[in-house]
Amino acid sequence: MRKQICIRLEADVEQIMDCRTSIKELDTSLNFVSAVLTLAGNKVRLQILFLLKREKRLCVCDLSDILEMNVSAISQHLRKLKDRDLIYATKEAQTIFYALNKDKLTTINSILDLLKKENVLI
């Protein structure tokens, strides 16, 4: 296999500077999307995000029953999603319900829209 080498005769300094500026301007957004993708890269957390999108809100026991996992494991995943502000919790009597953070829905929906069910986008 032959090694590919970049042999550039002249750099497009304007393009390079413009790209650097764009990357710097997007730094906060790039960090956020990267963090979301890292979290959603875990199958269980992706399942939780999907279920919360579908059902609007669920408690840890509901998620435990649906995903057939113990409450402790689900709670750890919920904590990670909550720490990144992707979900929030509300308490009603003795039950804590989790839901998607509406401020983050655009990013979350973009990821979940990649899921297919019977060849139809969700």
Image (spheres, helix red, strand yellow):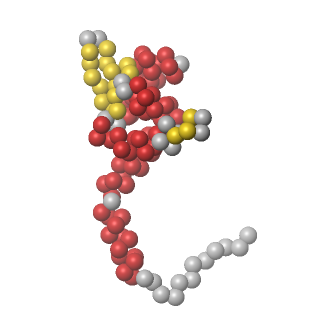
Q: Residue 34 appears at what percent x and percent y?
A: 41, 50
Residue found at the far bottom of this picture: 9
| Residue, far right | 1
The residue at the point 46 percent across, 32 percent down is 50
* Residue 119 visible to the viewer: yes
User: Closer to the camera, 94 or 55?
Assistant: 55
Rendered view: 47 above or below 59: below
Quarter of the view holding residue 60: top left
Left or right: where 5 falls relative to 80: right
- Residue 83 appears in view: no
| Residue drawn at 37 percent across, 55 percent down | 30
Residue name at image x 46 percent, y 39 percent: 112
Q: What is the count of numbered marks?
A: 0
> Which is more toward the observer, 118 or 52?
118
**In this picture, is 61 found above or below 18?**
above
Q: Position of residue 59 (x, y in %)?
A: 37, 19
Where is the N terminus found, in terms of image quarters?
bottom right
Question: From this viewpoint, which residue is outermost toward the top?
Answer: 94
The one of 107 and 77 positioned closer to us in this rendering: 107
Q: Is residue 115 left or right of residue 5?
A: left
Name the residue at 35% across, 76% down: 17
Res 6 quadrant in image? bottom right
Q: In x, y percent, where is residue 31?
A: 36, 52
**Rendered image quadrant of residue 100:** top left
Give the percent coordinates (x, y) of residue 68: 53, 19
